[in-house]
Amino acid sequence: MKRLLFIELQKIWLNKASRILTIAYFGLLSLIAVIASIKFDIGPIHIDLKENGIFNFPYIWHFNTYIADGFKFFLAVIIVSMVANEYSYGTLKQNLIDGMSKKEFIASKFLTVGLFSLASVVFVFVMSLILGYSFSDYTAFDVVVMDLEYLVAYFIKLLAYFSFCLFIGILIKRSAFAIGFVILWFFIEKIAYGILKFQIFNGSDKVDSFFAFFPLESMSNLLVEPFSRLQIVQQTSKQIGAGFVKDYEVHFTAILIVLVWITIFIIGSYKLLQKRDL
């Protein structure tokens, strides 16, 4: 397994574009710290984000993982290109000739996907600890370790999304078309959801239950937006008479659905490779 992972990492690092995107990705993640300096005024109201609790434990785990998730497309491009280059440069065929099995090939890609996901989680974890202990009003150990399930959800979401990109990369073989399809599928799910939810079923919750089984929608259900949890947002909504109740928990059923999709994507990638004439 170490040998397979080393081969993939070497390919990525020797590719200039992939190397730049990887560095840019982790550089952008570190910019979450810049949010602490954001201050602005809305009429007589002064907004200082760090003073409004965005870096308070345990809320910071939810906030930072949600923000960090927005940058995953940078690594998605690397994953898709990693697969497409195997076809373009003929390295896949050469690896198979040299003795690598198709199962080992898929395993090497999945290990790389897993490593990227784990590295992202560790990076966000360390950064959140630093920001939390710097700005949080609550630093007791039992408070700090609350809500760590958001890191688990973040890891599974990344793993699923990158597995999806891996599957699409093998299915289409061309990086530009594969990336385009990933973006297209996102809009297909969102448009279909909007039409069914608001045009056909008049806001019925049954539509949400149905779409919870779709690949990208099931992934998004792992990390619900955290902004409405902020005290200032809750207070403002009550003042204008728009109070609401929202479920921010990470549910086991949502994790299970996404784990099934990961399995489908990896097995599907292997089956495609088995049947394809290289």
Image (cartoon, rainbow, N blue to C red):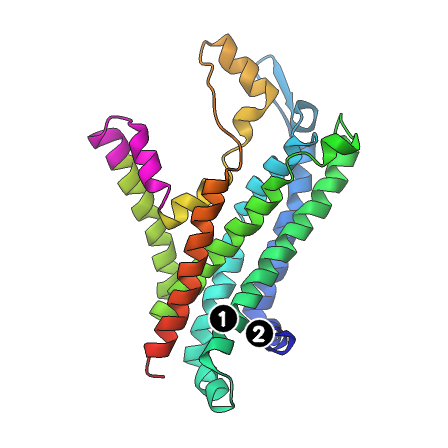
Residue at 49 percent across and 58 percent down: it is: 162
Residue beneath disc 1: 82
Distance from the alpha carbon under mark 2 to that under mark 1: 9 Å
What amino acid is at disc 1? Met
Q: Position of residue 75 (x, y in %)?
A: 53, 59
Q: Position of residue 248 (x, y in %)?
A: 52, 31
Disc 1 is placed on an element classified as helix
Q: Position of residue 137 (x, y in %)?
A: 76, 25
Residue at 37 percent across and 78 percent down: it is: 274
Of residues 132 and 34, the one drawn nearer to the viewer in this rendering: 132
Are dots 2 and 1 in contact, CB under 8 Å? yes
Disc 2 is placed on an element classified as helix
**Residue 211 is inside the magenta segment:** yes
Q: Counting residues from the N terminus, which is met first, the one under dot 2 or under dot 1?
A: 2
Q: Position of residue 109 (x, y in %)?
A: 52, 70
Check the image and report above or below for 183 versus 15.
Answer: above
Which residue appears farthest toward the bottom when viewing the image?
97
Check the image and report above or below for 98 versus 105.
Answer: below
Of residues 115 and 274, the one drawn nearer to the viewer in this rendering: 274
Residue at 39 percent across and 44 percent down: it is: 217
Which mark's residue is nearer the viewer, 2 or 1?
2
Q: Is residue 174 visible?
A: no
In the picture, measured across the screen, residue 44 lies left or right of residue 193, that is right
User: Magenta stretch?
Assistant: 196-213
Check the image and report above or below for 266 versus 253.
Answer: below
Query: Where, quadrant-wise, is the C terminus in this rendering?
Result: bottom left
What amino acid is at disc 2? Glu
Residue 13 quadrant: bottom right
Residue beneath disc 2: 8
Mark 1: give few (<14), some (14-19) or many (20+) Cα within 10 Å.
Answer: many
**Residue 141 is inside the magenta segment:** no
Q: Main secondary structure of the magenta part?
A: helix
